[in-house]
Amino acid sequence: MFGNRQQFEAIEKIAKLIDQIDRRVERIETVTLVREPGTAAAAEAYEGLRKQVVAAVQNRTSHLAQLAQIDAAVAHGAAAEDLAELLGRCFEQAGLEKVDDADDPELARYFKFVGDRDSGRPEVIEAAYVDRATGRAVRLGVAKYVGHRSPQDEGEEETE
């Protein structure tokens, strides 16, 4: 059940991001209509913006298709393994990487830590999600440091 909640939250996050892209595209269209592309620099800027708008629309369409696939799978009672596989394909298409390795060299960059930082080796509580194209965290993960027990403590438990 916990996995379904995370999947639902991920779907909500994607929907919010799509809304943001849609609003930004509208703003870009408004700005380009107001400006007159009379100079060479303005014409280049206009062409660059046009390409970005086209790319944003393509990305939005791709995300909408992914959401539709996920919804159809959930509606048909897909097993958790099937949903995980579908999400993996969606992540691959979107260039999104799930980071859940406590030994990742970028751990400090992609995770917020809870608890005492000087108490041992890191352990991932919640995965981080990273945009492979930019290297930026889309969603920070949560990690904690797990303290190492001394051999004395372990020996005492065994003798009890």
Image (cartoon, rainbow, N blue to C red):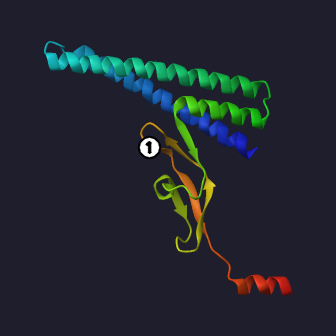
Q: Nearer the viewer, residue 22 or 150?
A: 150
* Residue 116 relative to residue 33: left or right: right
* Quarter-of-image position of residue 21: top left
Image x and y of residue 42, in percent: 18, 19
Which residue does the numbered mark 1 point to in the structure image?
A: 135
Residue occupying the point 18% across, 14% down: 36
Residue drawn at x 52%, y 34% is 95
Mark 1 neighbour density, 10 Å: few (under 14) some (14–19) many (20 or more) = few
Q: Secondary structure at mark 1?
A: loop
| Residue shown at 59% from the left, 20% from the top | 65
Which quadrant holds the C terminus? Answer: bottom right
Give the residue drawn at x 72%, y 33%: 83
Whether residue 160 can be seen here: no
Left or right: residue 109 compared with residue 44: right
Between residue 50 and residue 5, name the one nearer to us: 50
* Residue type, mark 1 in image: Gly
Residue 128: where, in percent of width, then height? 55, 48
Q: Is 12 rendered above or below residue 122? A: above
